Image (cartoon, coloured by chain):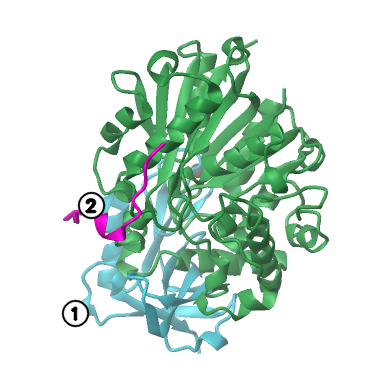
Chain colours: A green, B cyan
Amino acid sequence: MPERVAIVGVGHSDIRSITPGVSYKELMFEAATRAYEDAGVNPRRDVDSFISVSEDFWEGTSIFDEYVPDQLGGALRPVHTVTGDGIQALGCAAMLIRTGRARIVAVEGHSKHSDMRTPYHIQEFAFDPIFNRPLGAHPHYLAGLEMNRYLFETGTTREQCAMVVRKNRSCAISNPRAVYGARLSVEDVLASPPAFYPLTELDIARPADGCFVMVVAAESVAGDLAGEPVWIAGYGWCTETPSLESREWGEAVYARLAAQQAYRMAGITDPFRDLDFAEVDDSFSYKELQHLEALRVCRPGEAADMLEDGVTGPDGDFPVNVSGGSLGVGHLLEATGLHRVYEVVLQLRGQAGSSQLAGVERGLAQSWRNLPTTTGCVIILEKG
Amino acid sequence: MLERITNPEEVRTWSGAVPIEHVYTVGVAGEVFFRAIKDRGRLVACVCPDCGTDYLPPRLYCERCFAKTADYRDLEARGTVHTFTVAHFDLDGRRLATPELYAFVRINGSGGGIVHRLGEVAASDVYIGMEVEAVFLPPARRTGSILDIAYFKPVV
Ligand SMILES: [Zn+2]
């Protein structure tokens, strides 16, 4: 039986819409300092391996992983970068520990979105250069195409998607990490300027800057550390296809398959019954609904009904994005998955302040690598 | 923890740009596809002999079973709107004076399709399931690219 693995320390920098006063390295240093303090570890002595998540184009630096070690306390130590989401890095950390290669691993993800002058050009540069990029369209048009098909296939309405925005931005008001807390009505969302039909401007999560660091440890050492452990019960990730021409437009297949892996590992057969709450990708309003269906929390087309019935609200039977999600907190690029995990960890530790849910034992975090990708990750966390 | 700047005039930045230029090889299957567009005003599909998955644009291998594809065939550049959107922003994030229509068009007789602009139609008249056909540039102006198709328009 391989050793169990826990998240034993979490920390984050200030999360802001812009952070002109600090460099990305200083954001990372701040988050790392807090995470090590929380775990009660000294990175120069106790951390065996370091993993960051980043994407060179967002950073404006090629071979960006070279710029990672020093501000994490990882100089002259094993460090590697995952060009993916933070949940993938947590999975890698768990595997490093379960293979016996490391006992304590630090995982980092950050967003310095406000340093980018041409973010949409960078995102469009991720589209297929031969078949899609010549159109020269703003990358969010792809979300418009997806949402329209999702609504068509499931019968979900724009009003119901607007309710996701209302819920998440309202939840964000009580989250001190959230940049975009607001009381909005469904009418506010529908009447906001059109963006990429059926999306309005308020259907789209806005970016934020910030950094998250987590310390992951083997069960054999977790008990000796200061941080209250939250156990990693399962994880998985999957990429469908880069091709717009052969992907599914209405269903998030990547999330369904990633969840299958995580559920198998965690022994979950009925996600709605076996999980208490979830933080799922809501980088566009419809995505929360589409992802919940892919996670098999409900059947296809039923996520909007759950929302309308209050089941996925903060007082419901299956609260979703009680943190405010990306719509309420802000989208944090590759750190988005780690942010969702952070919120799940706080809930399971009972440290979520006025957002705290009662009696939660097991939660799920799910991420999507945003447009134009079909990559999704799922992680299941539980109390001791 | 960090001391913070309280005077915004103390904030220093440095600007940088990355001059990236590239050629992208279209490959064996891409060559077949773009020659058909340029020379014949047709689209090309192919099929996986193992699982039957149909590819348009064609590709050399099947992503589902890793087999080599076969049966390259010409198709008319006609299909149905599988989904569409109206874009109100350009790539620089500026609001467009004239919004642009985009669609994923499933090509008749194939399992794939093309993401492209829609033209000769008002946004309010587009619907999922609408029949459309490609409007090609005149043969002399085609270069063998996806932009040899100007847009898709409704079949009258
Ligand atoms: Zn096949």
Q: Is residue A324 left or right of residue A336?
A: right
Q: Is residue A330 left or right of residue A172?
A: left
In terms of secondary structure, where does tag 1 sit?
helix
- Report the residue marked by disc 2: B25
Measured in 3D between alpha carbons, the distance from the residue under mark 1 to the one under mark 2, in whole angstroms, is 23 Å
> How dense is the environment of label 1, judged by Cα within 10 Å: few (below 14), some, or many (20 and up)?
few
Q: Residue at x 81, y 52 (%)?
A: A316
Of circles 1 and 2, which is in front?
2
Q: Is residue A50 above or below residue A17?
A: above
Residue B10 counted in the magenta span = yes
Say which element carries label 2. loop
Q: Chain of mark 2?
A: B
Subunit under mark 1: B
Q: Which residue is mark 1?
A: B140
Nearer to us in this view, A35 or A144: A35
Name the residue nearer the viewer: A40 or A81: A40
Query: Which quadrant of the view contains residue A43?
Result: top left
Q: Which residues are magenta?
A: B1-23
